[in-house]
Image (cartoon, rainbow, N blue to C red):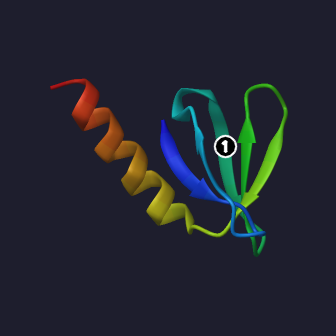
Amino acid sequence: MIVVTKINDKAFYINCDYIECIESTPDTTITMTTGRKIIVKESIDDIIDNIIDYKRKIYR
């Protein structure tokens, strides 16, 4: 799980295994495998870094 921040400044966790794609148009939009779209404040690079850190922690 990674932490992301919605546009209204509410932080919450999402399961990164269910991310289908991440777009920047210009807001960062995460599309989940369920079809749900979430607009967040983090950049694509920040989200990818968080996913990599999370995966490193669980696969050690």
Query: Dot 1 lies on which element?
Result: strand
Q: Which residue: 23% across, 24% down?
A: 59
22 left or right of 58 in image: right
Residue for point 77% across, 50% down: 38
Q: In the picture, residue 41 is in which quadrant? A: bottom right
Residue placed farthest to the bottom in the image?
26
Q: Is residue 53 left or right of residue 26?
A: left
The image position of residue 22, as x and y in percent, is: 65, 51
Nearest the viewer among 2 and 55 is 2
**x and y percent of residue 23 in the render?**
70, 58
Name which residue lies at 45% across and 53% down. 48
Q: Is residue 44 above or below residue 59?
A: below
Quadrant the C terminus occupies = top left
The residue lying furthest to the left in this view is: 60
Picture mark count: 1
Question: In the image as oriented, which residue stretches furthest toward the front?
Answer: 10
Task: Please determine whether, in this image, residue 16 is positioned above or below residue 28.
Answer: above
Name the residue beneath numbered marker 1: 21
**Nearer-the-camera pick, 12 or 44:** 12
Image coordinates of residue 13 in percent, x first then y, are 57, 42
User: In the image, residue 21 lies at what x, y percent?
Assistant: 66, 43
- Residue at position x 24%, y 36% from top? 56
Give the residue type that dot 1 points to.
Cys
The quadrant in which residue 58 appears is: top left
Is residue 18 shown above or below 30? above
Tell me if mark 1 has few (under 14), some (14-19) or many (20+) residues whose alpha carbon lies within 10 angstroms of its own.
few
